[in-house]
Amino acid sequence: MLTHAPHPDRTAGHRATAEAVLTLLLPYRRTLDDPQDATPDAFHPQLRRLTPAIAAGAPIRFTLPGFPCKSPNPAKVLGHLPDEGERLALRFLDGLCARIAAVHPPGARIVICSDGHAFSDLIRVPDAHIDAYGDALRTMIRDEGLTHLDLFDLRDVHGDLPYDEQRARLHARYAPSLETLRSGTRGGDEETRRLYQGITRFLFEDTAAFPGTRSALQRDCRTRAYGVIQRSRAWGALIAEHHPRAVRLSIHPQPRGSAKFGMRLLDAPDVWMTPWHSSVLQHPDGRRQLMRRADAERLGRLVLRQGRPSHFEAT
């Protein structure tokens, strides 16, 4: 049976389109290195992932693990439901897909893979709060007319099984061993080490009440951080199985060459900060910034939307 190689001009055109899509993403790249000198040809994993959909004339599909639930620390957030931070982030993602359609007419879709149930026991947020958060996200996507976004969570995989059983199945099938993660953080795996340190810090900051000493809390958070990474890696493997052709985005900083592309959703002073770990402060010039609720509260007045706390306006 004869096969024909792709026409060189067509192949070059597909590559050019993939680079044009990456050019749209690069200004929002979340990274710990210098983002200024990054060019599309430095992101080979993403170019390889983008090209098949472009060659097929199909919509590009992205997956973005994140939007798990609100932080349980009331000094950081306004409550357990989505607010202006999520609204702005969702609008940004939907708008990014619309802009991709200008360079790739079939367009793009982002599947938000809400991961709260994967590790709710470890971050100590009730599953009922995570259900309410996810349901409110779906309502927000619908009410805002965000037609390029989909939401995916453990309920789409295991239905109505008890969440403890869903987590146990996820962990047993996909999670790396604790020994593997520990050897990575201690043996020069810089990405795993940074992730471990970042999650440990988040867990420490998110603990609003702890009966023991500060050093005991730090030990507890270090232990839980490894569990969160195990479940996060498991969630990533499940997503790859359910969305095998998607381009993987991440809300964590990612180096060049990573299979994941780090995405910054909104302006924040900390590259690890997200809408679900913070509140929005709107400045007089219209700029919106993520920061801890306690800080935003000192700088502005609370704004309600549909009777619920939404964000702060600088005064």
Image (cartoon, rainbow, N blue to C red):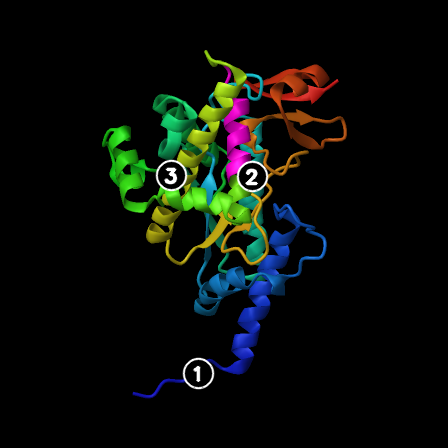
Task: Report, in whole angstroms, how far the alpha carbon at label 1 lies from the one at label 3.
Answer: 42 Å
Q: Quadrant of residue 277?
A: top right
Q: Main secondary structure of the magenta part?
A: helix
Label 2 Cα crowd, 10 Å radius (few <14 / some 14-19 / many 20+): some
Q: Does 234 appear in magenta?
A: no
**x, y percent for residue 70:** 48, 26
In the depicted structure, whether residue 17 falls above or below residue 205: below
- Span shown in magenta: 196-208
Q: Are marks 3 and 2 in contact (CB under 8 Å)?
A: no
Q: Amino acid at mark 2?
A: Arg
Residue 251 can be seen, yes or no: no
Of residues 298 and 33, which is closer to you in this image?
33
- Secondary structure under the numbered disc 3 in the rendered image: helix
Of residues 210 and 109, which is closer to you in this image?
210
Depth-wise, is mark 1 or mark 2 nearer the camera?
1
Q: Quadrant of residue 271?
A: top right
Give the residue displayed 52% in from the left and 40% down from the top.
Answer: 195
Residue on which the image places disc 1: 5
- Secondary structure under the numbered disc 2 in the rendered image: helix
Residue on which the image places disc 2: 91
**In terms of sequence position, does the residue under pointer 3 or pointer 2 come before the other?**
2
Query: Viewed as shown, does residue 161 lie left or right of 290?
Result: left
Give the residue displayed 67% in from the left and 31% down from the top.
Answer: 289
Of residues 194 and 277, which is closer to you in this image?
194
Depth-wise, is mark 3 or mark 2 nearer the camera?
3
In the depicted structure, whether residue 39 falls above or below residue 273: below
Task: Report, in whole angstroms, how far the alpha carbon at label 3 lies from the one at label 2.
Answer: 28 Å
Q: Amino acid at mark 1?
A: Ala
- Tell me the tag on residue 231: 3
Q: Amino acid at mark 3?
A: Arg
